[in-house]
Amino acid sequence: MDKTETSTRAQWLHHRTKSNYYIPATSRWVAARTQRQFWLLAPLLVLATFVLYHSSDVDIDVRIRWQPDSQEEPPPVLGPYNVSRAVLGPPTARFRDTLRPDLKYITGFVAGGYTNDFMTYVNIVLLAQFTRRIAVIPPFSPSHIGYNESNIPFGDVFDVPRLAEALQTPVLEWRDIKKDIGSVAGPMSDKLGCWSSWAPMETEGPRAGMARSNTLEDRLGLDISYTTVPESCKMPEAHPYVSTWQLVTLGFHSGWLRGTQENQPMKSERPSGHRTFPDEQLLCFDFLYFMGTVGPFEWEEEYHPGWQIATKMHFTPRMVQIANDFLMRLFDVQMEEYIPPFISVHVRHGDFGNECSRASIPTSDCFAPLSVIARRVQEVQDELANTRSGLNGGEPLKVLMTSDERDTAWWDDVRSLGWHFVDHGPRGEDTAAKFGKWYPPLLDSVIQSMGTGFVGTHRSTMSLIAKRRVQDWQGGAVRDVRWGYPGADDH
């Protein structure tokens, strides 16, 4: 390895560790009180140093090549769950050239909107835990903001090093194993065989019996041939859900054998038209949103094993800092510690209006009015006053609204209640212009999680995840607002 290669590797290792986790490279020894004590301890110290040095799993190539008089920055000492432990080196044009032959991995794809995609990635990590594999998480797909937008890497939103430490296993992203993702020229094409958990659910229309389509495959440079998962993976009483435990079996050779004997690979939809059985080293699925352990949609259940993963997925320090900057301006304070406790509210209208239309109910009757939402907010105020006495000096907490509602009159009514909101538009924070179209919904989700209390919209996955974060991260009080017909939230 020449000096240039060593420098490149050191820079790569530093890049993958600099955001959060550093392991101190020095230790402090207390001097012996007397010269005699020192000479008695010296042989033991030498022996201990020798044993620790030679038993360390730090990359030996990096350790011996950097010299104290070097002009380069010394490489960090890497923790056991660092990305570099799970790959052969920096990302390559062909992802297989990056994977370690002695390890196994798992990945999947998405096409369901930011929050639903987050839940899908949680399911991927959950399967990784059960199959003793390393999760490779793709970027988020811009299905809800327009496919002309670029993907945003998972690790730009969520703190991957912190997640890996919490799970005590490396967690990878596709950008860790394949280069040129997101470039103008695009990545090189890799052929891959994957399982389709969606094909047996798609029973009508032109794509009946086919895998779930998505844009990530093209953007990741993947040419995939899918094989339908075995019939045993279906949950007959919970269509279109598939069983977590049955999918786990496909991560082991015996399960792979049974699955490939039952179903043959479908032709790739790319020009190659190849047919390839599911890969055994990189286990992959087309769509894992509909996955359950004992029943459908377990995200509201305390026992849901996926939430034990999701609650460890914290936002990056950068995302938190941007959100704090917004809150300081909103509440007119100069320091983060002066941001007052608040109740975050999420009201989802948008596409929920389609359900109102199908039921022939005007949205004015279908959606809960602000007076109903205010009643739920008061319930949270009262609960916090009883359970956390002295909070905010005994004064009612401020209320911060987030919503996809576009009616300016509705927002005027929110303001008339004395509630606050982050204006992402050009006359406010102009968030999309400053950071990109991804950031208004992303920052809303960060801000929602910061509430001491939370009020959300029933059946909204964004509200559901925010509610559980406030419960876990803030120990907060939470409520849902039901909707769909007049009086839906009466109680």
Image (tube, helix red, strand yellow):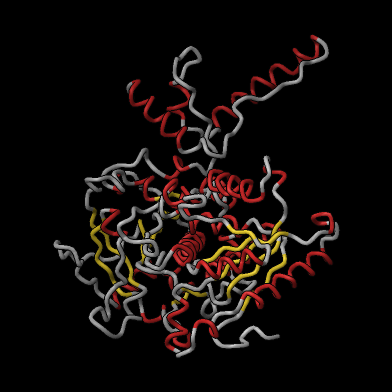
In the image: residue 435, left or right of residue 321: left
Image quadrant holding the N terminus, namely top left
In the rendered image, residue 303, in percent from the top left (x then y), is placed at 63, 72
**Vertical arrangement, residue 234 with respect to residue 325, above or below:** below
Q: Which residue is painted at 33% across and 71% down in the image?
A: 196
| Camera-nearest residue between 85 and 253 | 85
In which quarter of the view is residue 258 placed? bottom left
**In front of the other: 143 or 434:** 434
Taking the image as shown, residue 202 lies to the left or right of residue 164, namely left
Q: Nearer the viewer, residue 470 or 231?
A: 470
Q: Is residue 284 left or right of residue 350?
A: left
Is residue 64 visible to the viewer in this orientation of the structure? yes
Judge by depth and name the residue closer to the eye, 338 or 206: 338
Q: Is residue 127 visible?
A: no
Quadrant for the C terminus, please. bottom right
- Return the x and y of residue 342 as percentages of the image width and height: 70, 58
Q: Position of residue 205 (x, y in %)?
A: 26, 83
Furthest residue in direction bottom, as rendered = 360
In the rendered image, the vertical position of residue 249 relative to residue 50, given as above or below: below
At horizontal 47% and vertical 77% (from top left) the residue drawn is: 352
Q: Residue at x 51, y 30 (%)?
A: 76
Tell me: residue 326, above or below residue 115. above
Quarter occupied by residue 370: bottom right
- Residue 435 rendering spot, x and y as whole percentages: 44, 47
Residue at position x 27%, y 80% from top? 209
**In the image, residue 341 above or below residue 380:** above
**Count of numbered labels shown in the rendering:** 0
